[in-house]
Amino acid sequence: MNLNDYIRDIKDFPKEGIVFKDITPLLKNAEALKYTTEALFNLIDDKEIDKVVGMESRGFIFAPLLASKLNAGFVPVRKPGKLPADTIQETYALEYGTDVLEIHTDSIKKGDKVLIHDDVLATGGTASAVCKLIEALGGEIVQCNFLLELDFLNGKDKLEKHKVKSLLHY
Ligand code: AMP
């Protein structure tokens, strides 16, 4: 199955100059959804995982599906003010300005083996902030796994010391 047939480019979304990779055609197709979940699962080398961490909001789609297959838990990383209990936060740079992500302090135990998942790896700013949050809680990042990677933005470089694998490359 060629997954590229189920991912469409939306020009100038959410703002001018950005070509947005829209995965909703893939999500609404039962066969493509199942195939993608299996393929993302097969990308994971070490399947001894305690927690799968997904970032708001499109990381929330496949991360729990992978967690269920791994017999692991799912942990959400969210924008500020969304998580109700005690959190720690990480500020990271965007093209213009900064953004903040939060995680519950009780979501990861010291020594937990963690898989990170998001739909798109672009500049790597988001994933690198998530890595910092997990490490601050004592988690061990086993792998960072993406549905698609925009190779020309070199996001992998920001995750240098971590194993990064993506299903599709653009
Ligand atoms: P970055 O921090 O630059 O790696 O951006 C990653 C986050 O932004 C991910 O959560 C993606 O879902 C989203 N994102 C960035 N660029 C795109 C794009 N071209 N198409 C779809 N989502 C994107």
Image (spheres, rainbow, N blue to C red):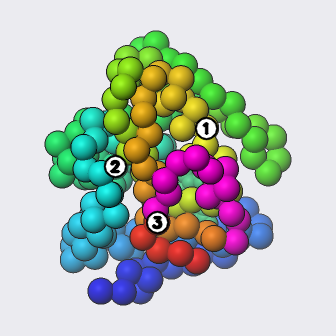
Q: Position of residue 169 (x, y in %)?
A: 53, 75
Crowd rating for badge 2 (residues with CA inside 10 Å; few <14, some 14–19, many 20+): many
Q: Which of the 4 image quarters holds residue 44?
A: bottom left
Expressed as whole percent of the image width and height from the top left, the position of residue 120 reads: 53, 61
Q: Determine the residue located farthest toward the right in the rendered image.
A: 96
Q: Earlier in the sequence, mark 3 or mark 2?
A: 2
Compare residues 76 and 162 and report the one nearer the observer: 162
Q: Which residue is mark 2?
A: 63
In the rendered view, tell whether residue 69 sits above or below residue 9.
Answer: above
Q: Position of residue 108 (x, y in %)?
A: 37, 25
Residue 29 visible? The answer is no
- The stretch of residues the image draws in magenta is 152-165
The three-letter amino acid code for the residue at tag 1 is Ala
N-terminal of the two: label 2 or label 1? 2
Question: Mark 2 vs ligand 1: CB under 8 Å?
Answer: no
- Residue placed furthest toward the top: 86
Q: Earlier in the sequence, mark 3 or mark 1?
A: 1
Quarter occupied by the N terminus: bottom left
Q: Which residue is under mark 3?
A: 166
| Residue 157 within the segment the image draws in magenta | yes
Q: Secondary structure at mark 3?
A: strand
Q: Identify residue for label 1.
A: 129
